Image: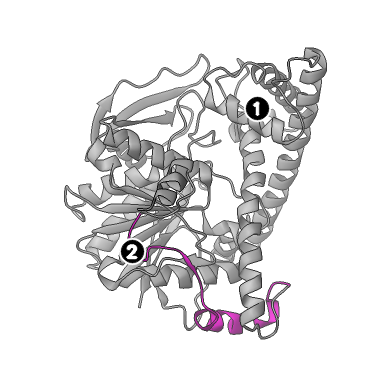
Amino acid sequence: MTRRDLCLLALGHLPLRAQPGDRPVYLSLADARPILDSFAAELPAGLGSPPDFASWSMWQAAHDKEIRARLKRGDADSIVNLVLFGASFTAQRRLTARQMEKAGDDSEAIGKLILARIQDLASAVLHPGPNERLRFAAAWLNENGVDVSDPAADKAVLIKRIIVLLLENTRRVLREQNAYTRAIDAARSERDTGSLFTVRSSLYRDRGVSLDTSFRPNFAIERSLAGIKAAGLMRQIRRAAVIGPGLDFTDKRSGYDFYPIQTLQPFALVDSLRRLRLADTAGPSVDIVDISRRVLDHVRLAVAQARRGSAYTVQIPLDRDTRWLPETTGYWMTFGSEIGGDAPPLTAPPGVEVRMRAVSIRTDVVKLLRPVDLNVVLQHVPLAEDRKLDIIVATNVMLYYPPFEQALALRNIAGMLRKGGLLLSNNALPQIPGLQMRHVGATSAAYSEDPDDGDNVLWYARV
């Protein structure tokens, strides 16, 4: 590695591990041609019909920037999740969907609760201390024109400006969420399960790309892996990847803010593969594919600390007010048993009804992770045949893109998978000739007695 590379790595700008040729490349016009032909009537602005090399290259470069810019809008959505569901800065109750349902038509009560939580956050963010979520909120406010650290600012005026900005942002997200709910309800009224799943699979195509996540989808992935093993589609996995694993920042379903920000899915994948004897105790390697600097830096830091001998501890909450199915509870109780040991869990704040587990993940497992800065809609890594991936997991990722971009992502994924390798996604993805990816199976997993609390995971094989 050159001196310049070492400097870039220290600054967090070296996107891929130091292997010869391991650099992301844009999808070639030739490889994209079947997709461009299939979507000829609905190509994005800026692409010719048919696109030539110049228009294709220019569109890719510009769209890469556009997609990455959506992370900022996703950050704004995460701030709203903190407002509604955070417990570390306020004694007000979390504004969960269940609580909103209990309030019924009493929108005034909901409005008062939201305002009270915003006021508490506005006060707390002035003195964030070591709270990394409050520090993130302070940085977001600063980026949006409110410098919370200005010593010359009048405190009362500053708090008022913070409240106004947080209230505007919260109203925006709630309006958008109402629109998504209407779209889902309209699809559900057609009584076509396939149509409903299709609508859900690109629901956030115009939304900011959010990083928030929880443990739920990992149970569905483990159930899928068990089905794949039973079907004889996979026997041993040496190389895997997770696209967009996210960060457990604050989520309305099983995500809280009283423990450090963490990532779950890479470790859950290794844990499940070992439990099912689909990977040996030395593997698999797991590439973390993401466009988020926050995610990639978080993984880099975890790996660096593991190399110095520090384990990675995850906190696994389980809501007491959710009617969990026994299978979900069983998964929660065994999570991490193949990759670490039980650790003392943190105590939830007063008023937060939750069971807690904590798992200390061994350093040898953490060191299996390798961060990869790559926009899978537009890019792939041209791996040698003996280094191609056996399996790729992408949950709650593809719904941020329209079908055209999902098809491009599938073609890029195909370029990184070995023949017979699998993609697992909880979104329905387009199947068109020339993609080299074929739907070969699916798994359903319900998490609780709530009929909407579950996932369908589809299996796509590289042909």
**Furthest-front residue in view?**
3
Depth check, front residue: 3 or 435:
3
Residue 20 image label: 2
Compared to residue 403, the image places residue 282 above or below, namely above
Q: Secondary structure at mark 2?
A: loop
Give coordinates of residue 73: x percent, y percent: 67, 46
The part of the chain drawn in magenta is 18-45
In screen coordinates, is 78 left or right of 154?
left
Depth check, front residue: 463 or 124:
124
Which residue is drawn at the image coordinates 45% and 45% (left, top)? 7
Measured Cα–Cα span from mark 2 to mark 1: 40 Å
Q: Which residue is mark 1?
A: 138
Q: Secondary structure at mark 1?
A: helix
Say whether residue 39 is magenta. yes
Give coordinates of residue 268: x percent, y percent: 33, 44
Which one is in front in this view, the residue at disc 2 or the one at disc 1?
2
Q: Could you tell me if residue 361 is visible in this image?
A: yes
Give coordinates of residue 29: x percent, y percent: 55, 80
